[in-house]
Each structure stands twice: as structure tokens, then as C-alpha cells.
Amino acid sequence: MRINTNVSSLTAQEAAQNTSKNITGSLEKLSTGLRINKASDDASGLAIADKLRTQATSINQGIANGNSAVSLLQIADKSMAEQSNILDTIKAKLIQANTDTTSNDGKLSIAKDVNKLLEQLNNIAKQTNYNGTSLLQSGRGSAQESKGLSFQVGEDRADLIKTKTIQANSTGLKLTTLKGGASAAAVLTAGAVSTKFGKTIISASQKLIDNAISKLNGYRGDIGSTQNQVESAVRNLMTQSTNVKAAESIIRDVDYAQESANFNKQNIISQAGSYAISQANSVQQNVLKLLQ
């Protein structure tokens, strides 16, 4: 029997240290709720889980982009809805003017109303914006057509939903002739109304208004279909986000039932290890009997 090196005790101590490490790791998982807390826990699992988390983050940002796009499109649609009301009013006034029961003074008042309504139509196009981005024309100080808007609703740079160009002002709706005729000085004198705002001009103006209404409805139709497309994309992304998070959870999150059972097992083993070390140390005392 050898007492200088207690091999049995050393073996028991090594096992106890390994068990202690296992207990520490198990407690870390139970306290954080994660099965993978560092790369050494599961290197390949960590790489996959991190990629899934990045994907989920990107998808969630795409959802946020989509919701913002819906808000933007609703602003544009509501503004054009008001413009549509203006065009309807103008058409009604032109019909009122295109009858002999309306006097020259009445036609003069109608011409003034039409001019004011077209000014408000342009004001709406000028003022409608989302976070500084003009929606119905190229800019607040420019009546040119706006460039089509682009929304990234997805995790890839190619996941874009676009709108067509819009020019919802008197220039874009081809109403500059009507606006100029209605505001000309010659028209705004009762004596010249019959010639400058007569039946021929009024009939032509009604055709212009009809064309403008059709064009504006086309703009609204594009906005509406784009909104439907964005909302559909958002719903799809929400489903993807849920599934990706579920996949990440399977890899990264701890199973409490399994881990608590493992902790209890390691705890029992640790207690048994302490008893084994105690017994290994006491065995050495048997040598004393040989020396008696």
C-alpha cells in the first residue's frame, strides 16, 4: 500500500471538479434561460442561432418599413380623396354655368369659385408630405411629377415595392387652361363672361375635368393597390418572423424540464463525489495498522 500519492483521492477529486463544472454550467442555463450562453456550449448551434436571430431582426425591420409605408400611402390617398371632391365640385359648377338659367353674374361667380378650387387643389398637392417627402408632386416648390416611391418590405435589398409617378396638381391633371381662363382679367368682368366663359369654353372645360377625374382615380388606384401589396407583404413577414424565432428558440433556449433534471442528477453526483473523497482519504489510515 502506498500513501505518498493517494491515487483514489485524486481520481475522486478530478471527478468532483468535473461535476462542479457541470453544475455551474447547468445553473447558468437555468438562470439565463439559454441552452447556449457561449460558443463552447454548442459552436455550430450558436452560429445557426445567431444567423436566425439576424434574419428575424431584418424581417422585423421590414415589417416596420411596411407599416410606415402603409401610413404614407394612406396620407396620399386621403389627400387625393379631397382633391377628387374638389374636381366633383368643379364639374357641378361647370354644369351649372352651362345653362341659360345662369346669368353672366352667376357665371362670373362660378369662374371665381373654379379658380379658387383649383388653387386649393394645387395647395393640397404642395402640402401633402410624409416626413418631408412630397407625395403628390416632386416637391413643395416644384409642380413637376414626383418620382415613384420605393419601400423595402423584406430582409433582402431586392424586396422592394414601388409606386408609379404622381403629379396630382393642375399641371399634371391638364387643368392649367381652365385655371388660366377662369382667372383671366377679361373673364372677371361681367361684360366679358359670355365670350371668355361661354358655352364652348364650359363644354371643353367639362371634358378637361372628366379627364382629370379619370387620371386622379388612376393615381388613387395605384396607391390603393400598392397599399394592398404592402399589407400582404407585412402579413407574410409576420408569419416568417414567428417561425424564424421559433426555430431559433429550439436551438438557443433551454428546456427547463430537461435541464432541471440534469441539475438534480449532477447535484446528487457531487454529493456522492464528496463522500467518495472522504472514503478515499480514510482508506489511507489503514496503513497505520501495518505499523502497529
Image (cartoon, helix red, strand yellow):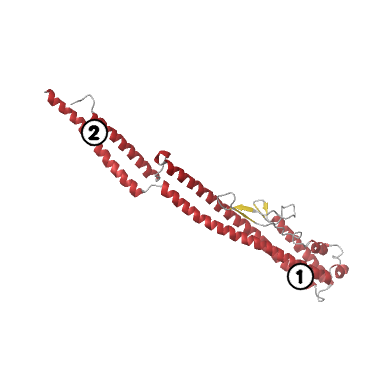
Q: Does residue 158 appear to the left or right of 270 in the view shown?
A: right
- Asked if residue 86 can be seen in this view, the reply is no
**Vertical side of 100 occupied by 54: above or below:** above
Q: Name the residue nearer the viewer: 23 or 181.
A: 23
Residue type marked 1:
Lys
Q: Determine whether the residue tagged by mark 2 lies in a helix, strand or loop.
A: helix
Rendered location of residue 89, percent (x, y) = 73, 68
Residue type marked 2:
Ile
Q: Name the residue nearer the viewer: 155 or 208.
A: 155
Rendered location of residue 106, percent (x, y) = 81, 71
Q: Which residue is mark 2?
A: 277
Q: Which mark is residue 93?
A: 1
- Asked if residue 227 can be seen in this view, the reply is yes
Q: Quadrant of residue 223?
A: bottom right
Q: Which mark is residue 35?
A: none
Q: Quadrant of the C terminus?
A: top left
Q: Quadrant of residue 95?
A: bottom right
Badge nearest the viewer, 2 or 1: 2
Q: Earlier in the sequence, mark 2 or mark 1?
A: 1
Q: Does residue 32 appear to the left or right of 221 in the view shown?
A: left
- How many numbered marks appear? 2
Q: Name the residue nearer the viewer: 146 or 126.
A: 146
How far is disc 2 from disc 1 in space, using C-alphas? 104 Å
Rendered location of residue 132, percent (x, y) = 67, 51
